Amino acid sequence: MDGDPAVEPELDSFSLTLPLPYRVAIAIVLGVWAWGLNLHYLSLAKIDVPSLLQYPSRPSPRTDPPHYLSTFRFATLLSIPLAFSLFLFWILSHRNPDLVIFYDFLPISYLCLLLGLFLLPIRHFSSAGRRRFLTTLRRVSIGGIAQTGQGKFGDILLADVLTSYAKIIADLFVALCMFFSSNGSATKRPDRGCGGQYVVPIVIAIPSLIRFRQCIIEYLRVRDSNTKNGGIGAHGWGGQHLANALKYSTAFPVIIFSALQRNLSVNHEHIGVTETTLYRLWLVAVFTNSFYSFYWDVAKDWDLTLFSSARNSHAHAYGLRSRLYFPGKEIYYFVIATDLLLRCTWSLKLSPHLDHFADFESGIFLMEFLEVGRRWMWIFFRVETEWVRNVSLASLGTPGQDDVLLGDYGSEPDDESD
């Protein structure tokens, strides 16, 4: 089974149990639970995430629930109808292919409910947090980014999360496209060519394009600031923002070559290159994107010294930094190794023909699940790094602010995220 309905039209065993719309829903709900865990553990580590995100303080800290508890309540609100819908679907379909296809309105109905729960002003379920999320999502959805001190760090975090959800967002599009197609069904074998050969690749590219535009905006802000001040200021000339934009741009060749490889088997005479050439170009693009991103995770997002001349300093453990908030240096080495492994394992994350490299839909879902887990892990250390930067400025008598700049590219770590 290669995942292409034109080649293998029958539903595989995994899709009979967990059709594509439910997989999308589970990934979204899992992300809410993961964010609650981020907030909870970081609060235990004495890291004030709301202040980093420029989130308004609680009116009554003693009576209002902490932010992580509000997130857990909202995640529970999302999970209960999901579990009910899934169990009802299993009872009615009995893993019968015809019934699985017939009852596709159940998972689609839950996806509509999921959207409604984010939009409805339900009290006691993180209503303020949902409003803040939707406001931020509207801003970043076109590549916008807030000013420093007005929530810029939160914009960057959300846009980075969207890059990890790129394939899931594409699957959401595929499910809706199949549902609204004539004689279509959202629970049939996923047709990742739904809507046209290049629509899904474009959808996958949007989150990386969002972050690319944010980086360019940051560079232009630094350039304009230097122009007004009559010279290069403390933030440098903005090279780090351009380097980060370049990192996000390395995702585009992966998407393009992946789409060309998929279409080569459909209409190879119009592409003009051989399958071997496309595969080699794709391999180079994937290698560049994965290892550039890994380097940025470690050296820039987490401010670790593994790739710098300071890695042998006696002031800190090898490859780390002097100030660590999480217990034990071993956890940092474990996270570095895990991030490298998942970056390489997820080298197919942007590939519209991912199903050509996985034998089953379960393999595709596993890859998406691993990327969500990698991003969840990444957030812990990205937020810790931002907190360390703020504490360092505070110790120098400078007020902390979100998304601190600590020099230009090739100098000290900067503010950009993955």
Image (cartoon, helix red, strand yellow):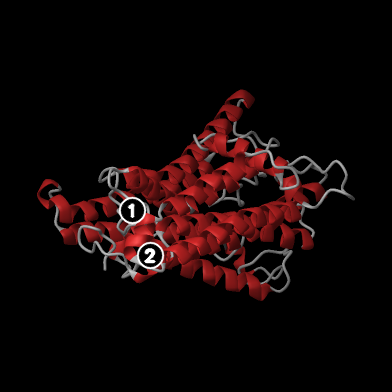
Amino acid type shown at disc 2: Ser
256 vs 246, nearest the viewer: 256
Q: CA distance from mark 1 to mark 2?
A: 27 Å
- Residue at 12% x, 49% y: name it: 272
Q: How many marks?
A: 2
The answer to which of 323 and 27 lies nearer the viewer is 27
**Residue 135 horizontal/vertical position (percent):** 62, 35
**Residue 222 on image: x %, y %:** 58, 33
Q: Residue furthest front?
A: 92
Q: Secondary structure at mark 1?
A: helix
Residue 184 numbered tag: none
The part of the image, by quadrant, that contains residue 221 is top right
The circle drawn on residue 15 is 2
Quarter where residue 388 is shown? bottom right
Q: Residue furthest right?
A: 62
- Drawn side of residue 183 relative to residue 79, left or right: left
Residue type at the position of mark 1:
Val
* Secondary structure beneath label 2: helix
Image quarter of the N terminus? bottom left
Dot 2: few (<14), some (14–19), or many (≥20) neighbours within 10 Å? many
Q: Which residue is mark 1?
A: 254
Would you place residue 197 above or below residue 34 in this image? above
Q: Nearer the viewer, mark 1 or mark 2?
A: 2
Residue 18: x and y in percent read: 43, 64
The x and y percentages for residue 373 are 54, 64
Mark positioned earlier in the residue sequence (1 or 2): 2
> What residue is shown at x 53% (from left), y 70% (from top)?
338
Q: Determine the residue positioned at 33% across, 57% down.
A: 188
